[in-house]
Structures are given as structure tokens and as C-alpha cells.
Amino acid sequence: MLTTRPALPAIAVFVLLAAPFLWVVSFFEQREAEAAQESVQSTAALLASKLESFVDIRLRNLRVFAYFIDPESLNQQSFEKAARAMYWSLPSLQAINWIACDGTITWLHPLYENLAARGKNVLDHPQTSDPFRRALKEQRTAVTPALEMFQGGAGFASYTPVLAPSKGGVETLVGVVNGVFAMEALVDDALEPELLEDFVVQISDGDVQLYSSHALGAKASAALDHAGIEVSVSIPVHSREWKLILRPTAQNWVLRQRSVFDAVALAGLSFIAAIAVVVYLILSRRRIAREVRRARERMRRSLEEAQKAEAVGRLAGYVAHDFNNLLTTIIGNASLIEASRGLSALDRNHLNQVLAACDRATGLTAQLLAFSAHDSVEREQIQICSEFQILMPLLRAMTPEGIELDYCCDCGDEWVAWTPSQLAQVMTNLVSNAVDAHEAPGRIRVWVRALEDSQRICIEVSDQGTGMSPEVLQRAQEVFSSTKGAAQGTGLGLASVARIMNECGGSVRLHSELGKGTTAVIEMPKIEPPENVVDESASAVPSKRCLRILVVEDKQAVREVTESLLRVLGHEVLATESPAHALAAWESDPAFDLLLTDLQMPGMNGLELIETLRARGLRAPAILCSGYAENVRPERLRELNTSYLMKLFSRDALQRAIAQSAVAGAPELESLTHS
């Protein structure tokens, strides 16, 4: 008894001191476990969102790829050429195939890696037949469940029908664009390697496992059982739903536990010191964890925005470049028809509408290239009400039945420093947004007026749609911000409007309330009317001199229409399809009065061709033709005695360029600003 009595007070003091200390340690351990659960939950949501966006972008790009396939010129060579460009722009895409209407895989890219799929019929496969039939029946993209692909390995495929218009407005099925995705490559490209090292990631489609980042061994299983953390998140992929399961790895959990045990060991040195150290360590650790999470979130958002901007810019350049060539062919042939005799007044009116629409498309294409390259477009001087008279039929054509479009112009003959294409892009975006916010019946009002006691023009676009909440309204002008569904838009409309108004010295404001509609108010400064308004058609006087012109253009349709336009203008033309043929033609007969060459061509571009011919003795003036010239320097054109001609040219524009080059022999530097 004597030996135990002194121990009793010590034990009592120890118990009294240890009890609150152990309670504090237990409390913080519980909070640490909750924080770990929240961290895994947020990480799982981040991975699911990123993977969903990653897959959605690729499916969208494949739909755009299928939409721009020209059924009339479709063949194996043209398909594989377009597929090659799309294949290299989309990492983790294993193959792009062409499937005939009967389900046979006909054309493949890349070829050698996917030879096992050639000639196979997707209707014979139990997991691909139903999605393929659904894509044909519904005439829209369908996605397969998880499957063992013809090319080997686990993954999934998408089927996008390609339709061709026929008589009576009925679309005819031409074939199906098949995108094949290897699941392991897709996930590895979409997710950061650091996350895959710290967590076990499993993705399944129904009962079939698509992907697993780790093979769980005995130690990992024991650690996971001890941690008790497992998060499951759904990932919508088109019409299907994947399931993502996330668990921390053994190493991850051990590190979390070690910090708690170290804090407990340090706290045992002294009750007072232990409490202070534990509180300090936990608060510091949580502060660092918050900062790390915020940094990761900022990096994730920056990466997503960069990936979206890169995909949009790459797609814009690809689409606009091919669209320029198509429009050049349309405008050139329309100019040839316009020059022919015997057209009735009605036919000529229809032809003028075609040319006017092509002119608008030309400006919109230039705006698309400017958006992707972050370039500005030179401002012109336009009479605002006159331009609206031309634009209103297009805006009314965008408005569906049941929604009225009212237009009022109260500003007289006012001029602004704008281009017709900028006005068209701003108004089509605003009216399109107003239409999307409506359900018939409804009314959209466009009001153009001059502000009193102000040197500014005001354009208001008002609708009676659903409106926006203050939170949505605050982010409305951000890039990729959109209230539309996944298949309705990209979120670039209002961002483009804001960018254009900023370039022109104007402003855009939005007023909106939920259930009461939205009003977009655009203001921009007026300018003095130009002293002389030049009629471009008056300058298009046929040249009296017949020139021998060497044309170099790798696109057959553009080359043929350019040759026809030049012959109609009375010139002698030799059209070649490549720089190599042009060099051979010049060597055999160098007596050419003018060189007209495209800029972007395989093997050698137009500038390199002009430099080569100048070195070999060419003294005649040259014209460099392209849809965009961001890499062309004006001083270099002056050195080479070369003019620049914007693609999408008409007969008159081509004749003016030839006349200026033949007479002055100096580059038309101002045209570069339209690129």
C-alpha cells in the first residue's frame, strides 16, 4: 500500500491530463479522416468532369469532321487526307474509319495499325450492331458500350452518319464516320500522371471494366480496407453513363496516417507543448492543403481553357481554310455567270443574292480566322442603316415561325468605323441568343438610334425570353460561358461580341431578369462621312492588254475557276497544280507577264516559289493569293515586287489586282490587314 499511494495521485493527474489530450487527438484524427474523404470526393469529381469534357470535345470534333465531308468529291484519298489531319489533332484517337451503309469498314486511318478492322462488318458484332443501327435510324451520333475492339484492347467507338441533300429536300445517307478510342490512351492523355500515382482509378461501363490504373496487391488492399475510402462518380458520355471509382493508394494513405502519428509522438513530450504543436501542425497542414487545392484548381481551369482554346483555334483554322477554297469556287463561278449575257432580271437578282451571301460569308470566315489567331480586323466606314437593310433578310431567316422580329432605325445617315462582317457577326450572335431564349410565340426587337447629346450610335436587341440570373449575367461575356445544352452551342457568341466591340472602341451591356427577358445594348462612336465613296465596280474596267499569266494553285476547283475568270478577262493562261510544275513551265517558256500563285501549297509555299523564280530571272510582277497571311511580311512583298490578293475574290477584284500589279508593280500592302 505504501508503494502504490504515491502512484495514485500521479496516475490521477496523468488521467486528468491525458483524457483531454487524447480527446483532442481523437477529434483531429476524425477531422483528418473527414478531410481525406472530402479530398478524395473532390478529386473524383474533378477527374470525372475532366474526362467528360475530354471525351465530349473529341465527339464534337468528329461530328464537325463528318459535317464538312463533301459527298460529291468523297473518295478514299480525300477521306484519308482529311482523317489524317483530324487524327493528329486529337490525341488518344486510335482510328478514324469510313463505314459503308451496309456496316462494312471500308477506309481506315491509320492503315497499318488498324488492318485487322478492314472489311469487318459492325453489324456482326453484338456490341456495335445496335449503336450502328441507332445512328442510321436517328441520323445522329451514337456511342457503343465498352468492347474489345477489332484493333485490339478495350475501348469504345462512335458512329456519325454523313448525309447528302437530294431532290425534294430529303437527305440521303452516304456512309458513317467511325471514331475508335483506346480507353487506356484516352484516360492517360486526359488525367495527370501525379493523380494516377496517388489514387487507384477504375472506370466501368455497366458490368464491363474499361480501365484500371493499378493492379491491387495484398498491401494495397489492406491499406484500402484500413482507410475505408472509396468514391464512386457517374460520367455521362453521350447517351451512355460510365462509373468512375477512386481510392487512395497505400502510399497515399500511409503518408496521411504518418502525419497524425508524428503529431501524437511529438505531443507526448509535454501536455502544453503537445497541444500547441498539434494545433500548429494541423492548422499549417490545412492551410497548405487549401493552398495546394486552390493551386491545383487554378491549374486545372487554366489547362481546360487552354485545351478548349487550342481545340477551337485548330478547328477554326482547319474549317476556315477549306471554307475559303469552297467560297472562292462559288464566288468565281457566280462572277462568270454574272458576266454572261442573256440573264433575266429575276435570274440576275437571284445571282446578286448569292454574291451578297458569299460576301457576308467571306467576312465571317475572316472573323473566324481572326478569333483563332487573336488578330484584329481593319475597320472600315459603313453607313449603319444601309448595312442593316442588307442584313435584315438574313436575320429574319434565322428567326423561326411564331417569333416576330421587329426592326426600327432612327439614326438617319450615320456612319460608324466598322466592317460589314463585324456588324453581321455581332447581330447574328445577339439574334441567335434571343431566339434560343424564346419559346413561340414571342417577339424580338432590334432598335438602332443615335443617342441625344452624344456622338454615339446605340443598337438594342430585346427579347421576351427566359432571362438570366445575376450570377449567370455576370459571367455571360466570358469565353465558353453558356446556358445552352451540350449540343446547342460553344459559348463563344457573347465573347466574340465583346471582343469586337472592344476593338472598335465601343461597349456592350446586358440587362436581364429571370422570366422577363434580356436586352443587349451596344454603343459605338459615330464618325464623319467619308469625303469620297468609291464605287469599286467602276474601277473594274476591262484591261486592253492581253497578258500571259502563270497560275499556280493546288486545289483543282479553285484553279479551274481562276483560269476561267482570267480567260473571260481576255488573258492567256497556263494553270499548274504545284510549284514543281510551275518551275518546269517557266523553264520551258519564261515569257510570262504575270505570276499568280497560292500561298499554302505542299512541298513549297507561294513565297518560296516567287523567291526561286526571282533567283532564276523572273522580272514580271507577281500576285500572292491566300485566305490568310499572318506569316507574310509587307517588306518581304516589296522586295519581291509582289502584290497580295485576299482569297474569296470576285472577277472584278481579280481584275483590279492584275491592273494594279501590271501598272504599278508594287504590292497592295493594305490588303494584308484583311487577313
Image (cartoon, helix red, strand yellow):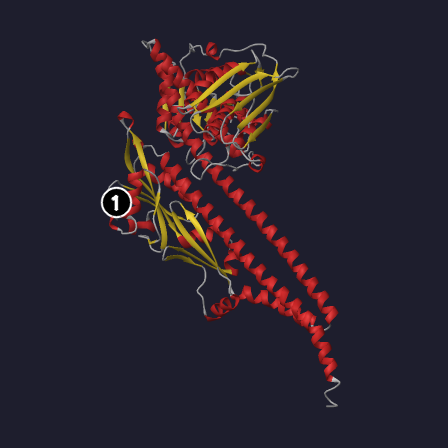
Residue 614 visible? The answer is no
Q: Position of residue 494 (x, y in %)?
A: 53, 31
Q: Is residue 345 left or right of residue 634?
A: left
Horizontal arrangement in the rendering, residue 348 relative to residue 638 (left or right) = left
Q: Would you place residue 355 above or below residue 258 in this image? A: above
Residue 517 pos. (x, y %): 52, 28
In the image, is 200 to the left or to the right of 559? right
The quadrant of the rendering that contains the N terminus is bottom right
Quarter of the rendering containing residue 458: top right
Q: Residue at x 45, y 17 (%)?
A: 653
Per the image, label 1 sits on a secondary structure element best described as: loop
Going 44% across and 40% down the picture, which residue do you hit?
Answer: 486
3 sits left or right of 41 in the view: right
Depth check, front residue: 294 or 68: 294
List the residue tagged with mark 1.
Answer: 104
Q: Quadrant of the rendered structure where residue 138 is?
A: top left
Classify 56 as above or below 592: below
